[in-house]
Image (cartoon, rainbow, N blue to C red):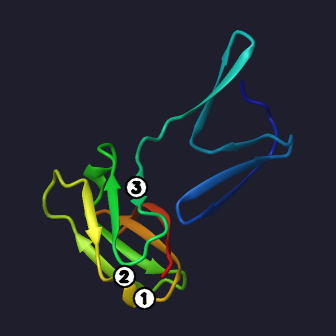
Amino acid sequence: MRRKFKNFVFGVFGFCLVLSISGVLMPAHAQQQKNNENIIITNQSNKTLTIYPVPVSTSVHIRISQALRPDVDKLEIINLIGRKITEQTLIDATTTDVSFSNLGQYPSGIYMVVARDKYGKIVKSAKMVINH
């Protein structure tokens, strides 16, 4: 069921949001299905980065979903002005868990975890908070 309204698309760090003039707010990657009288919204993307613990103090663990793993060549942690503070290249094709340590030397604040493909294109990103 699609309505013919003008949509506005906003994207920040790999997250996309579609705002419709009709007032309906729905993620761009969600699919809407009508099932009898119920409307079911399903997320079609199972490509995720899981970051723990939250907040981070000295080390962080990042889990790459199996669906995302073939696309990821390296993980980077960058600050909000875009400066890379550390990175790890994933050599083994089966690696889904990555750890970064020595994050205690960086100031408390918000950072981004960026997954890049072999060409350097960002395929996924997630927010991370360092708090000492």
Callout 1: SS = loop
Please name the residue that numbered disc 3 is placed on.
Answer: 49
Q: Which residue is mark 1?
A: 106
- Neighbours of disc 2 within 10 Å: few (<14), some (14-19), many (20+): some
Q: Quadrant of residue 27?
A: top right
Mark 1 is on which residue type?
Tyr
- Is the Cβ of the residue at disc 1 closer than 8 Å to that at disc 2? yes
Query: Which residue occupies the foreground of this view, 115 or 96?
Result: 96
Tag 3, which secondary structure? strand
* Pointer 3 or 2: first along the chain: 3
x 57%, y 57%: residue: 15
Q: Residue furthest left?
A: 92
**Where residue 18 sits in the image (x, y, percent)?**
70, 49
Q: Nearer the viewer, residue 2 or 83?
A: 83
User: Rounded to the nearest whole Å, what is the CA distance between mark 3 and mark 1?
Assistant: 22 Å
**Element at badge 2?**
helix
Is residue 127 rendered to the left or right of residue 123? right
Which of the image's four quarters has the N terminus? top right
Where's residue 124, x and y in %?
Answer: 43, 59
Between the C-alphas of marks 3 and 2, the distance is 18 Å
Residue type at mark 3: give it.
Leu
Q: Is residue 52 above or below residue 120?
A: above
Q: Position of residue 55 (x, y in %)?
A: 49, 69
**Image mark for residue 87:** none
Callout 3 touching callout 1 (CB < 8 Å): no
Q: Is residue 79 above or below residue 127?
A: below
Say which label, 3 or 1, has the lower sequence index: 3
Residue 119 visible in the snapshot? no
Q: Nearer the viewer, residue 17 or 104?
A: 104
In the picture, the disc for residue 103 is: 2
